[in-house]
Image (spheres, rainbow, N blue to C red):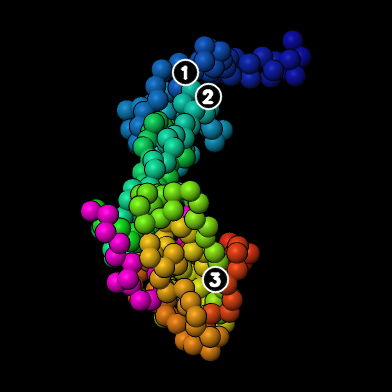
């Protein structure tokens, strides 16, 4: 036997036991599949044996923590797939917690599937937004109690509850809203500092900007059919006051520009009277 052949035979003899061991394990699906394990968190007992994801061979792990540690078994991704959190649809917005004063409304959604194997975590399950309702629980109008214009994001108007029918309103004609353009003159620094999810719209209020504020039928005073604080009959030079619902410290002044049938400002500069 030649020297090269002899050397090859010796190497084969040395490598055969390792090849036989690893080949048998990998052929049988060694790893998380063979161990039948998928564990939550970091679990030192949740182990397999075979090739690791980093290319090494030996003991490997089948727990969630192995992804961060880098010692997962090679088949961890297939044997223990990452499942994201699944949540349901948002509930309807609640009414204001209290009537006739700036307050908060809420909506919720619930977890339908918890995340597994380092899947995408659950998003926020609760949202809040400012609101103001001008009817008491007894149906009495209390809009006259508010002098400044209370405003909130136009998103509130999409799901706003319709005002309960009143004999003082015409049942034959549907009430039509209107829009008022204002130019902001001043505002407190608390608006720009607001970072709560339900109040981030306040960050877009800026001095010198023209904003649109819609007066919807559900916010109108029953007697005047107008929204409180809309600057009706005010000339362009009169300073008017406004306050953001949801943060009483976010407030300022503006001047009325004009009244229109419909608002046409960009969404970030579009608000509603509450």
Callout 2: few (<14), some (14-19), or many (20+) C-alpha neighbours within 10 Å? few
State how far apart marks 1 and 2 are (Cα): 8 Å
State how far apart marks 2 and 3 are (Cα): 58 Å
Q: Position of residue 263 (x, y in %)?
A: 60, 64
- Asked if the magenta segment contains residue 113, the reply would be no
State how far apart marks 1 and 3 are (Cα): 66 Å
Q: Which mark is residue 180?
A: 3
Residue 102 appears left or right of 161:
left
- Asked if the magenta segment contains residue 146, the reply would be yes
Residue, x 38% and y 65% (percent of image)? 223
- The residue segment tinted magenta is 138-157
Task: Pick the quarter of the image with the C terminus.
Answer: bottom left
Q: Is residue 70 above or below residue 26?
A: below
Taking depth in this image into account, of 53 and 102 the one nearest to the observer is 102
Taking depth in this image into account, of 41 and 196 the one nearest to the observer is 196
Task: Pick the quarter of the image with the N terminus.
Answer: top right
Q: Is residue 99 above or below residue 186?
A: above
Q: Helix or strand or loop: what does disc 1 sit on? A: helix
Q: For mark 1, what is the residue?
A: 33
Judge whether residue 83 can be spotted in this image.
yes
Residue, x 27% and y 54% (percent of image)? 139
Q: Position of residue 91 (x, y in %)?
A: 39, 41
- Sequence-earlier tag: 1 or 3: 1
Q: Are marks 1 and 2 in contact (CB under 8 Å)?
A: yes
Q: Helix or strand or loop: what does disc 3 sit on? A: strand
- Sequence-earlier tag: 1 or 2: 1
- Sequence-earlier tag: 2 or 3: 2
Residue 184 appears left or right of 168:
right
Callout 1: few (<14), some (14-19), or many (20+) C-alpha neighbours within 10 Å? some
Q: Which mark is residue 205?
A: none
Give the farthest residue toward the left.
138
Residue, x 23% and y 53% (percent of image)? 138
């Amino acid at each position: 036997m030649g020297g090269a052949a002899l050397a090859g035979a010796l190497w084969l003899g040395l490598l055969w036991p390792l090849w036989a061991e690893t080949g048998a394990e990998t052929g049988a699906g060694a790893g998380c599949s063979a161990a039948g394990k998928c564990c939550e968190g970091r679990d030192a007992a949740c182990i397999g044996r075979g090739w690791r994801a980093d290319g090494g061979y030996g003991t490997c792990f089948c727990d969630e923590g192995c992804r961060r540690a880098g010692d997962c078994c090679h088949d961890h991704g297939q044997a223990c797939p990452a499942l994201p959190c699944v949540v349901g649809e948002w509930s309807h917005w609640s009414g204001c917690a209290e009537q006739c004063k700036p307050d908060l409304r809420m909506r919720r959604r619930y977890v339908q599937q918890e995340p597994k194997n380092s899947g995408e975590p659950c998003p926020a399950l609760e949202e809040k937004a400012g609101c103001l309702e001008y009817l008491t629980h007894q149906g009495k109008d209390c809009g006259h109690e508010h002098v400044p214009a209370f405003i909130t994001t136009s998103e509130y108007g999409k799901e706003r509850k319709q005002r309960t029918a009143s004999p003082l309103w015409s049942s034959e004609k549907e009430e039509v809203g209107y829009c008022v353009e204002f130019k902001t003159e001043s505002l407190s620094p608390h608006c720009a500092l607001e970072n709560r999810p339900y109040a981030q719209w306040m960050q877009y209020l800026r001095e010198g900007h023209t904003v649109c504020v819609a007066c919807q039928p559900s916010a109108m005073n029953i007697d005047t059919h107008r929204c409180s604080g809309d600057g009706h009959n005010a000339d362009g030079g009169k300073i008017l006051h406004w306050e953001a619902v949801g943060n009483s410290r976010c407030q300022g002044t503006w001047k009325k520009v004009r009244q229109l049938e419909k608002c046409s400002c960009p969404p970030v500069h579009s608000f509603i009277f509450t």
